[in-house]
Image: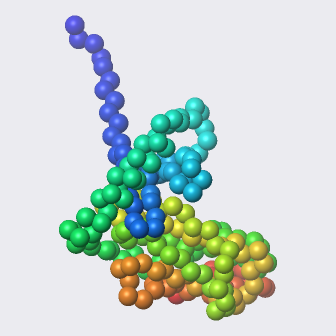
Amino acid sequence: INRPAVLLMISVVGTYISACSDSEKEDLYGLDGEETFHFDFEKNKEVYTLPKFGDHFECLSCYELALDNEAVCKSHLQSSVNTWTFLCHPPGAPLLYPRDPLLPSKPNILVCQASGFYPAPVNFTWTRDRLTINSSSVSQAFPQSDGTFTQFSTIELLQPEEGQEYICSLEHPALKEPATRLLIRTISITNTNNPPRSQ
């Protein structure tokens, strides 16, 4: 019997990362290049990073499994360091951009993006007019399909002023010196049509 039929194929790429070092540990699940959840080992809980919509899934035994995986990772860490040569890949030049168009005295957020590095994480440092900013936030390191990572850091601009200089610097084991990106606010208070200049 000939009947019309429809075949629907969906291809997804799942990612699982379990990693450790002398001082840090990471256990992360992802789907199609997006993180779905990771474990916060300091707070002893899962952190779900998907938007909250529809039915929310929970992995009730995953935290115990993550603890077991980290114990195995730690037990193999020293022998791996003595046996293998690890290749580090540096991040490219950081991208620095505002979330919204920059306007004088209008609150905004500056984003600094590091991409293409291995291993994770990178260390972000921010300065405004050559003074260190300590109130930045840093995202998880997101795995990419080529085995490298992307990570973001943000700072809030509560009262941006004309002529302020912002610098985002990246530190990573594969870099001999920090990679930096400079953004200078050049918007005139009387002329808001000029875009910010990134160098």
> Which residue is at a point 40% across and 75% down the rendered structure image?
91
Report whether residue 9 is seen. yes
Viewer-side residue, 60 vs 160: 60
Report whether residue 197 is seen. no
> Which residue is at a point 55% across and 63% down the rendered structure image?
139
> Which residue is at a point 32% across and 33% down the rendered structure image?
9
**Residue 13, percent from left and from top:** 34, 46
**Residue 4, percent from left and from top:** 30, 17
Up/down of 185 relative to 20, above or below: below
> Which residue is at a point 38% across and 79% down the rendered structure image?
173
Viewer-side residue, 155 vs 22: 22
**Residue 149, percent from left and from top:** 40, 64
Q: Quadrant of residue 81?
A: bottom left
Q: Quadrant of the N terminus?
A: top left
**Residue 126, percent from left and from top:** 60, 81
Q: How is the image coloured?
A: rainbow
Q: Quadrant of residue 155?
A: bottom right
Viewer-side residue, 126 vs 71: 71
Up/down of 106 relative to 34, above or below: below
Query: Number of labelled discs?
Result: 0
Viewer-side residue, 127 vs 75: 75
In this picture, residue 74 sits left or right of residue 52: left
In this picture, residue 32 sits left or right of residue 105: left
- Most extreme residue toward the top is 1
In this picture, residue 192 sits left or right of residue 78: right
